[in-house]
Amino acid sequence: MKLDYRTNQLIEKERNTNKAFVITPAQTISWEEASRISEKLQQIFSLYQLTKGHPVIVYGHKEAYFTVAMMSCIIAEMPFVPIDTIYPADRISYIKNTTESAVVINCTNSPTPFENVIEINSKIEHKIIGILPSTFVNYYIPENPIIYMMFTSGSTGTPKGVEITRRNVIAFSDWTTGPEYGYTENTNLMNQAIFSFDLSMYDFVPFLSLGATLVCTPKELCENRTLLFDYLHQHKVNAWASTPSYAYYNLYDEDFNQDKLPHLTSFVLIGERLPATTAIKLKERFESAKVINAYGPTEATVATSMIELNKSIFEKYSEVPIGYAMPNCDLVIIDENNNELENGSGEILICGPHVANGYFKNPALTAEKFITFNNKPAYKTGDIGHFQDGILFTTGRSDEQIKFNGFRIELNEISNCIGALKHIVNHAETIALRRNGEVKKLVSFIQLCENVDYTKEIELEIYKHCKIKMPHYMVPAELKLIDKFPYNSNLKVDKKKLEDIYLKR
């Protein structure tokens, strides 16, 4: 079996009742069983007279049932809204109230924090909690229905709901199931990111359309490398997708290599800046594997560009490029007036069929960030980039652009400069310390390469390099040595915690 996103229906391939649909440490569900569970969920939706376009909250953490529930919502043409159990109560309440969802598919074995809903548990039992609304809202657009709503962090502190539609998913699926990635129906894709983080769709979308197998790694596995590697080996996982930070976390263990994990033949790194040292070390450990650096925001269906990394790229460029655009997509560098720049650095504009409709119930922000460019839907990313040799590079975000002593500075440009010292520095991150809203100091946190000791000579070499490569106002006032970078729930470097670490020293 596999899912056809153009019709949102399961279609039969050759009969294979034992083919695994999803694998977790606790449970394996076959494609046949997933189909039966989906049919039962459709019956429950019909029983309550739920209409197409009504959003359904899927609540849990990496349970096998979670994956089946999301697929069932696609088939029912009811947008799924994934919420992980790690979310705080106020965020959960905000998402529920904003979507007006009256249905929660509870994938856990515990009560949910939701009220006034139809709750459907993993035993396919259903009950009403509280009082249901008199009518069920729906956001159905027949020609291009919403597939899922992904709530991301907003700069104001309020989550932004991104509407991803059938057109978006088809464009992304066609790309990730094509020859560049090499996935097939026999691929076992690792799902490491939580389902409420859009990186998880890098695994979920192609696995369904190929009829492949998804192998979920819950939190307890992700935090125990020995258990994780045994699990990946046992289930012959071929394809890995994660943030660069999580890949580097595993590189601390010498058993993370091709000999111990011979089935791993594909890596996709996405979600944050990829340090060259991480990419080089990963390619050394998995010499015959495909290592891809990918780029893209939630608003453009997970990813929009990619490049397969090799020795020649590492030798030619000091920074890791984010690659070439996916088919039918244009990547454009624009100025503050949305005019295309022929040369130089500017904001990355993404144009193509994978660009989302906009932000859910937020027309003002939608109008600001989503535009039409050359008759194509386009999204203003806020990422600063430039082309070199026809390849896209990014230097940071416009909202990480600070003003210090009258000068505009990209913090990631400083981090990239320090990270170019590949024989010394494994990873660098730079923060701006403020007082009364004004930047007072630049501090770079540095994680050294293995077998490198932080001496006065090393410090002087880093400063000398910075002074040669950057203007004086960009040279950090202080270098702070760190053994391991702190990460947030999406396994990206947590810069707020870096600030806390510095201030508590």
Image (cartoon, grey):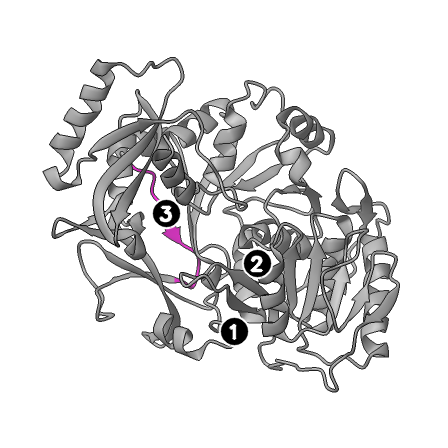
Q: Nearer the viewer, residue 295 or 358?
A: 358
Q: Is residue 402 visible?
A: yes
Question: Does residue 288 appear in this view?
Answer: no
If the image is split into quadrants, where does the N terminus sit? Answer: bottom right
Of mark 3 and mark 1, the one earlier in the sequence is 3
Region of the chain picked out in magenta, as a range: 319-329
Q: Residue at x 44, y 42 (%)?
A: 494
Which amino acid type corresponds to the residue marked 3 in the rendered image?
Answer: Gly
Tell me the kind of residue under disc 1.
Phe
Asked if residue 396 is positioned above or below residue 256 in the image, the reply reads below
Picture coordinates of residue 425, whole percent (x, y): 32, 25
Question: How busy is the neighbourhood of tag 3: few (under 14 within 10 Å), some, or many (20 plus)?
Answer: many
Q: Secondary structure at mark 3?
A: loop
Tell me how far mark 2 sits from mark 1, CA to CA: 23 Å
Please give the name of the residue rendered at 28% of the width and 34% of the height, measured from the top-left corner. Answer: 444
Residue placed under numbered mark 3 in the picture: 323
Which circle's residue, 2 or 1, is located before the other in the chain? 2
Amino acid type of the residue that numbered disc 2 sits on in the rendered structure: Ser
The quarter of the displayed image where residue 481 is located: top left
Disc 2 vs disc 1: Cβ atoms closer than 8 Å?
Answer: no
Q: Can you give x and y, in whole percent of width and height, for residue 29 in the image?
A: 81, 48
Are dots 3 and 2 in contact, CB under 8 Å? no
* Residue drawn 40% across the image and 61% down it: 155
- Between the C-alphas of marks 3 and 2, the distance is 18 Å
Q: Quick one: 495 or 323, which is closer to the camera?
A: 495
Q: Is residue 170 magenta?
A: no
Q: Earlier in the sequence, mark 3 or mark 2?
A: 2
Q: Left or right: where does residue 452 sit relative to residue 355? A: left
Q: Which residue is mark 2?
A: 173
| Residue 237 lies in quadrant | top right
